[in-house]
Amino acid sequence: MPGDGIGPEITEQAVRILEAVTEGTGLSLNFIPGLIGGAAYDAAGHPFPDATRDAALKADAVLLGAVGGPQYDNLDRPLRPERGLLGIRSAMGLFANLRPAILYPQLADSSSLKSEVVAGLDILIVRELTGGAYFGQPRGIRVVDGQREGFNTMHYNEMEIERIGRVAFEAAMQRGRKVCSVDKANVLETSELWREVMIRVSKDYPEVELSHMYVDNAAMQLVRWPKQFDVIVTENLFGDILSDQASMLTGSIGMLPSASLNDKGQGLYEPSHGSAPDIAGQGIANPLATILSAAMLLRYSFGRADLAQRIESAVNDVLEQGLRTRDICTKNDQEVSTQAMGDAMVAIL
Amino acid sequence: MPGDGIGPEITEQAVRILEAVTEGTGLSLNFIPGLIGGAAYDAAGHPFPDATRDAALKADAVLLGAVGGPQYDNLDRPLRPERGLLGIRSAMGLFANLRPAILYPQLADSSSLKSEVVAGLDILIVRELTGGAYFGQPRGIRVVDGQREGFNTMHYNEMEIERIGRVAFEAAMQRGRKVCSVDKANVLETSELWREVMIRVSKDYPEVELSHMYVDNAAMQLVRWPKQFDVIVTENLFGDILSDQASMLTGSIGMLPSASLNDKGQGLYEPSHGSAPDIAGQGIANPLATILSAAMLLRYSFGRADLAQRIESAVNDVLEQGLRTRDICTKNDQEVSTQAMGDAMVAIL
Ligand SMILES: CC(C)[C@H](C(=O)O)[C@@H](O)C(=O)O
Ligand SMILES: CC(C)[C@H](C(=O)O)[C@@H](O)C(=O)O
C-alpha cells in the first residue's frame, strides 16, 4: 500500500529489495497492491475502502508507505488520510507497535544531541496501538450548561495491558533484558491498573529487569541520557509522543522502520516518518526506513530473521560506501537518488 | 510552603531574597508558613490540610518548594504528596501554568544538545492546569465483562480553552509574538474543539502569529530545532510532558521557575524541578529556580516587574561570577552551597 506523498517511491524500492533478498530462498512473496489514505480517497472516495480491508485481512503482511497531504486537510474527519491508518490498525487488531530508535554510527553527526549522548543508541519502543484515547468511547463534542465541550475516554483492561506487556518482555529477552514501563500512575487510574498488570506480567520474566517511569520524566530522560533505556513499553498516546521524540534523537528519522503486529502473526510494516509531500515525486526520498520495515516484515511475519539480517547488513554496507539520500547527506558524502539507493542495495543483495 | 526533600532549603533562600529585594521599596511581604505534601501528611495526616487551603485562599501568592519522597510511595493514593499539589491547584483554580525554558549562556555546556541547537533558547510553555484528564470525571477502575478496566476522561469546554488561550496570546504580545498551539486534533475530539477555539481567540490578537502542531510532532521539533518556538500553549497532560522535555533541553532544570495563576491575580510559584530526596539536607541543592520563581511572584502577583528584574539580573551576576551549585558545576567553576548561593544573591541585591 504505497499511500501518499513519497509513499509510492519508497515502497517501490522496498518491494525490489524483498524480491531480491527472497530470490532462490524458497520464500516466494505474492504482492497485492492496495489503496489507502489520500490515494484511496481520490480513487475510491474513502481512505480505507472495503477492498483494502479485505485484502489486508487475507494477507500475511502489509507493507505501507505513508499517508497524508495538504490537499486532504479540509476533508471531513472520517475521510482524512490518517483515518485509513487508524482503520487498518483497528480492522487487523494491530495492538503492538514496535519502533526501534537506533543511531547508525555512520550518521552520528545528524543528531541534534551531543555525540556522546547518542553514540550507540539502540532503544525499542513498544507502543500499544489499538486502545487508550485513540479508540475509547464515549467521545465527541457535546453541549453542557450551554457551552460546547470536547470529551474523550481513555481506557485499558487487564487483557489489553497484559498482551502488550508480554510483547515488551519477549522483545527484551532478545535484547538488553530491561523493560521500562511508562505511565502517569500518580494521576490516572488507567495507569494505576497498567502498572499493576506490568508488575504481574514481569513475574513470568525473572531475567528481565522492570522499572517504571512517569511519562513526563521519561520525556526528560530521553533528552538527558537516552542510553539508559533498552525497551520502553507504554500506552497508545504516550507511545505516539515518546516514539516520535525518541526517533528524532537519532536525527535520521529517514532510517527508522516500524512494525505493528496482531496476535495472529500478521503485521503492518511502515517507515516511522511521514509522507513528506514537500519532496514527493522528486526522487530524493530516503527509501531505507521502508526497506528496513521490509526486513521487519520478513522477521516477524515470515519468521525469516536470516533474510532480515541480510537486508540490515546491506543497509550498513551502503552507508559504509558513503551513499546518502539528501536527508542524511552532509558535505563529505555522496548524494544519491531514491532509485540509486535501491540499486545499490539490490547490487549488494 | 517548603514541602519535602530539598524544599525547605531552597525556599529558605528564596524568602531571604524576597526580603532583601523588597527592603525599602514600600512593598512589605507577610510570610505565612504552610504545610503541604509529605511534610503535611507527617504533621497533619493529609497532604493538603484544611489549614493550608484556608491560608492559600487568603494569600496573594504561594511560594512552594517541592513535594514527594520515597517514604510516601506506599501511601494510599489520596494521601500521597502529589495529591497536595493537585489539591492546591484545584482549590485555588490555578488554570494557567507558565513554564519558561531558558538557556543561560553561562550554562550552555550543561545541555545534552549541541550548543548551536540550544544557544539563546527562550521558550515559554503555557500549560492548562485544572482541566483535561487530570480532573476529568468519570474515572476509576471498574469491572467490565469479568475484567478490570481502568478509565479516565479528558474534557475541555470552550471557556476553559479560551481563557488559557488568552493567557498565551497576552504572553506572546510581550515576547516574540508567536503562539504554537499543540494538540492531537487528528485523533481527539477534545483537541478538535481546542483548535477551533484557539483560532477564534487569535482573531483578537492580529499581531500574534498562531500555528498548530500535533503533540507527537511537537515532541520531535523540540528535539530537532527548539528555537523555532516562542510560546507553546497546550492542554494539561500534553503540557506536563512537553514542559518537562523542554526544560531538560537546557540541561539546567535547577534554574527553571514556574508560575501557576488563577483569574483573581493569585498565583503559586515553584521551581520546575522536583524534591530531589537523594540530596535533601546536604546543603548542595540549587536555590536559583526557587529564587526565580520568587521573581515571577513579584511580577505576576504584585505587579512589580522592576523587583523581578532586579532578582533576574542578580542571578545573571552570580553566574557571571562563576558561582555554581553542584548540579550546574563543571570543572572550571567554583562549587558553592545552597546557603552560599543565597548569600551571594543577597550581597548583590
Ligand atoms: C497519523 C496519526 C493518527 C498517527 C497516530 O497518532 O498514531 C501517527 O502519528 C503515528 O504515530 O502513526
Ligand atoms: C506531581 C505531578 C502530579 C505533577 C503533574 O503531573 O502535574 C508534576 O509532574 C508537575 O508537572 O507539576
Image (cartoon, coloured by chain):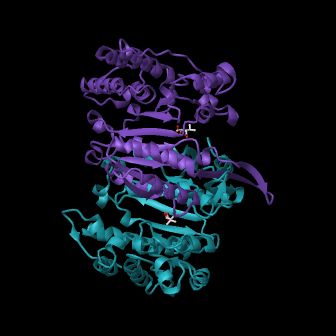
Chain colours: A purple, B cyan
Q: Residue at x 65, y 60 (%)?
A: B139
Question: Is residue B336 rendered to the left or right of residue B150?
Answer: left
Instruction: Write the residue at 41% across / 14% down.
Output: A19
Tell me the quarter of the image containing the C terminus of chain A: top left
Residue B52 x %, y %: 56, 83
Residue B14 at x, y percent in the picture: 41, 78
Residue A316 seen in the current view? yes
Q: Nearer the viewer, residue B14 or B77?
A: B77
Do we see residue B31 in this rendering?
A: no
Give the mark count.
Answer: 0
Determine the residue located farthest toward the left in the rendered image: B332
Which quadrant would residue B135 be assigned to in this image? Answer: bottom right
Position of residue A146 in the picture relative to residue A264 (left or right): right
**Which residue is at the front of the view, A127 or B105?**
A127
What residue is shown at x 37% (from left), y 12% (from top)? A23
**Looking at the image, is B200 positioned above or below residue B136?**
above
Residue projecting furthest to the top: A24
Q: Is residue A80 above or below residue A40?
A: below
Look at the picture and state if B65 lies above or below A19.
below
Q: Residue furthest right?
A: A146
The image shows residue B80 at horizontal and vertical percentages of 51, 73
Quarter in which the N terminus of chain A is drawn: top right
Q: Nearer the viewer, residue B249 or A259?
A: A259
Q: Is residue B58 left or right of residue B44?
A: right
**Position of residue A152 measured from the top left corner of the image (x, y, whole percent):** 66, 51
